[in-house]
């Protein structure tokens, strides 16, 4: 039986006193604690998914609980970025978001859990749910509500990776906000550009491209260490994290091939495998777990800060074209990501630590992937410390 742990799906805006203090300095009307379903600060409590009940994973509670004050208009974010896409779509925008930072404080409007992730990473200063922004009014001929006009005009510049192909929306947004960019979230079909380069180009930024791995808060890393111990992972063994799921069947590599790669890598490196299961992945994860050795570790539906931190602790990562794979690449995990031939050129990640590979029926692909992952696991354990158990120094 696989060892498994699951977590309440609650995204917290801040997870450390330093992040709380930073956010307080730049907080605005569009960034508030109501984004978090739990209504509390910190990572969610863990619970065992089967067997006897274990002690919960402690919730991270900031020691600094100062009230979040609303600053003057001059201190509010100067730029609003609108992107309602999913995890992988939004992570492709990281180089663009970094390029925009010199222009002033930045607000993000999209999925609440992604806004919380970006804010916790320090990529944006505030977040507001896309569904509550009210942009649907700009797709009609009716006068825009005064509340929407006031909200949009509070920003000096708006970048909307949404609505570019509509006839009315671009005209009406430009009539409200003098300085705005309205562009598709993906390049045209004829364009040879990757998604991340397209998004970067739309900003008009001239600063050097920053492709460094995401810098995670120490509180997230500490929580990942505790959870890995809870799962039964051995701190001194290399860790291979695998995400077998994806948003469509055509993006999922056969579990039999995944299992052969995992078994080869574990046998070759003496490492351990951790299988990540997202909300729609139970079937494929169950299939994979039945092939692998009993006791294979399984992580079930962690929140995004915890997942990011566990991926950061990975010695290597294997997955298909999915948001989880883009997150693994973004945190700097030595990743091998399998893409269908039709999407690899467009959706290849921006991170230089990730290798994009085209899925193939070739008999030799299993061996090549296993060798590539084994090399990554041996290389990473030689130049960076493996994740430490709680109470020790990283």
Image: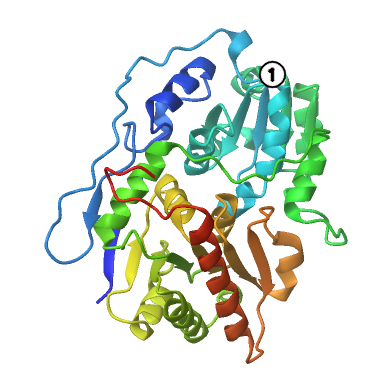
Asked whether residue 165 is in view, the answer is no
Q: Can you give x and y, in whole percent of width and height, for residue 19 in the image?
A: 45, 27
Identity of the residue drawn at 59% across and 56% down: 329
Image quarter of residue 202: top right
Give the quadrant of the N terminus.
bottom left
**Residue 20 on image: x %, y %:** 42, 24
The residue that disc 1 covers is: 153
The residue at the point 81 percent across, 33 percent down is 205
Q: Is residue 2 above or below residue 121?
A: below
Quick check: 109 left or right of 389?
A: right
The picture quadrant where one finds residue 5 is bottom left
Residue 79 against residue 75 in the figure, above or below:
below
Q: How is the image coloured?
A: rainbow
How many numbered marks appear?
Answer: 1
Residue 274 image point, x, y percent: 39, 67
Residue placed farthest to the left in the image? 52
Query: Is residue 384 visible to the viewer in this orientation of the structure?
Result: yes
Mark 1 neighbour class, 10 Å CA radius: few under 14, some 14 to 19, many 20 or more = some
Please identify the quadrant where the C terminus is shown. Answer: top left
The x and y percentages for residue 172 are 77, 30
Name the residue: 79% across, 37% down.
208
151 up-or-down from 137: above or below: above
Residue furthest to the front in view is 382
| Camera-side residue of 154 and 20 | 20
53 over 250 or under it: above or below: above
At 53% from the left and 73% from the top, the residue drawn is 374
Give whichever of 371, 280 is nearer the camera: 371
Looking at the rendered structure, the secondary structure element under dot 1 is: helix
């Amino acid at each position: 039986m696989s060892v498994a742990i699951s977590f309440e799906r609650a995204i917290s805006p801040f997870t450390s006193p330093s992040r709380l203090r930073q956010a307080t300095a730049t907080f605005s009307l569009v960034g508030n604690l109501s984004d978090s379903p739990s209504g509390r600060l910190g990572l969610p409590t863990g619970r065992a998914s089967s067997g006897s009940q274990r002690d919960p994973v402690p919730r991270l509670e900031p020691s600094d609980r100062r009230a979040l004050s609303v600053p003057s208009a001059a201190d509010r974010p100067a730029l609003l970025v609108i992107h309602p896409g999913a995890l992988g779509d939004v992570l492709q925008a990281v180089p663009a978001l970094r390029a925009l930072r010199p222009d002033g404080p930045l607000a993000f409007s999209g999925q609440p859990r992604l806004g919380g992730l970006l804010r916790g990473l320090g990529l944006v200063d505030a977040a507001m749910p896309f569904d509550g922004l009210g942009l649907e009014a700009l797709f009609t001929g009716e006068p825009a509500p005064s509340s929407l006009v006031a909200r949009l005009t509070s920003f000096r510049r708006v970048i909307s990776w949404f609505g570019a192909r509509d006839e009315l929306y671009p005209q009406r947004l430009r009539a409200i906000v003098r300085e705005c960019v309205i562009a598709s979230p993906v390049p045209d079909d004829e364009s040879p550009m990757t998604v991340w380069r397209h998004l970067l180009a739309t900003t008009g930024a001239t600063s050097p491209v920053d492709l460094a791995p995401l810098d995670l808060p120490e509180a997230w890393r500490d929580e990942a260490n505790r959870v890995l111990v809870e799962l039964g992972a051995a701190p001194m063994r290399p860790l291979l994290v695998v995400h077998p799921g994806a948003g469509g069947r055509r993006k999922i590599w056969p579990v039999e091939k995944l299992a052969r790669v995992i078994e080869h890598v574990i046998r070759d490196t003496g490492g351990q495998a951790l299988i990540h299961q997202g909300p729609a992945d139970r079937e494929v994860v169950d299939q994979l777990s039945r092939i692998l050795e009993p006791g294979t570790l399984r992580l079930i539906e962690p929140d995004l800060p915890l997942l990011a931190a566990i991926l950061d602790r990975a010695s290597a990562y294997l997955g298909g074209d999915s948001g989880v794979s883009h997150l693994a690449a973004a945190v700097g995990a030595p990743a091998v990501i399998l893409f269908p031939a039709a999407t690899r050129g467009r959706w290849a990640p921006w991170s230089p630590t990730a290798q994009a590979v085209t899925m193939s029926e070739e008999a030799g692909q299993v061996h090549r992937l296993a060798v590539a992952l084994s090399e990554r696991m041996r290389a990473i354990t030689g130049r960076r410390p493996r994740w430490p158990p709680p109470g020790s120094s990283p």
